[in-house]
Image: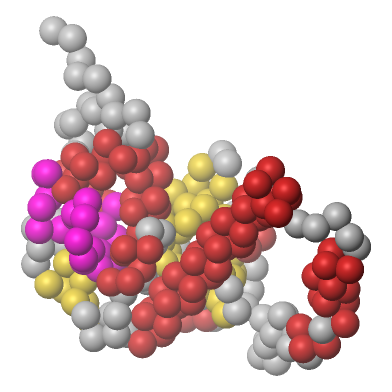
Amino acid sequence: MESPEKFKSSKEVIAFLAQTFPNCFSVEGEAQPLKIGIFQDLASRLEEDERVSKTMLRSTLRHYTNSWRYLHSIKEGAHRVDLDGNPGDVIEKEHADHARQQLEESKAKAAEKRKARQQASPKAQNKRPPGRQNGDSPQAKPKSDGDRGTKPKINRPNKTPPAKLTDEDLKQGTAVTVKLGKAPMPAVITEIAKDGIHVQLDSGMVVKVTPEALRLARSKRS
C-alpha cells in the first residue's frame, strides 16, 4: 500500500488543520487565539498522519500565528482555545500589546516593500521629470530631518541582565526570555534544531532564534 502524499506547503497544511480542527483553526474570517503549547497537542494528535511532518507542522504554525489575521485576534481579555475549541487562558495586556506591535511592524514593512516596488517600476521612473530639483529634495530630506534622530531606537535596561543559557539549559521545556522588539518576551523552548532554537511565546507564536538571543527567565534563576 502506497503512503499518502505529504503536504508540500503551509497553505495546504492550514487548510488541512482547518478541516480537521474547525473549532480551532480557520482559513478565512476571524482567527481564534491558540492555546499556549498547541504545537505539542498537534504533534500528538497527528502522530499517525504521514502527510504532515513535525518540521512542516512547526513552520505552518509559525506562518499562521504571524499572519495579520491571527495577530489581530490577540486582544486583552479574549480566551485562547485548544484543538477542540474549548476556551482556556485569558490573554493578558502584555501579550495583546506585543501582538499589536508585531502587527504594526509587519504592516509597516509591507508598505515599505510596496513603495520600493513602485519606485523601481519603469512606469514610476518615466513619470519623474529629468530635472534634478525634484530629485534632490527626497534625498536631502532624510539628512536634514532632525526628528528621526531625537528618539533612540535602543532602550538599554538598567536592571541586571538575566543569565545566559548554559548547555544544560538548552533543552525542551526551559523557560526563557527572547528579545523581540523593544522588550524581552517570555517563552518556552520547544525544540533544539541544527539551524536554531525554536521557542514558543506566550502569545502562541513560534519563532526560531539563536542561543545568543535567549536568556534564562528570572523565575528560573537562583
- Residue 142: x and y in percent read 82, 75
- Residue 121: x and y in percent read 66, 46
Closer to the camera, 184 or 189?
184
| Vertical arrangement, residue 81 with respect to residue 56, above or below | below
Residue at the top extreme of this rendering: 1
The residue positioned 47% from the left and 81% from the top of the image is 219
The residue positioned 40% from the left and 44% from the top of the image is 59
| Vertical arrangement, residue 52 with respect to residue 61, above or below | above
The residue positioned 62% from the left and 53% from the top of the image is 118
| Vertical arrangement, residue 125 with respect to residue 2, above or below | below
Q: Quadrant of residue 130?
A: bottom right
37 vs 117, left or right, is left
Q: Quadrant of the N terminus?
A: top left
Closer to the camera, 96 or 177?
96
The residue positioned 90% from the left and 62% from the top of the image is 132
Residue 139 seen in render: no
- Residue 8: x and y in percent read 34, 28
- Residue 160: x and y in percent read 68, 86
Dominant secondary structure, magenta: loop
| Boundaries of the magenta span | 19-39
Asked whether 30 falls inside the magenta stretch, the response is yes
217 vs 55, left or right, is right
- Total labels drawn: 0
Asked whether 95 falls inside the magenta stretch, the response is no
| Vertical arrangement, residue 87 with respect to residue 219, above or below | above
Residue 48 seen in render: yes
Query: What's the image's color scheme?
Result: secondary structure
Q: Quadrant of the C terminus?
A: bottom right
102 vs 114, left or right, is left
219 vs 130, left or right, is left
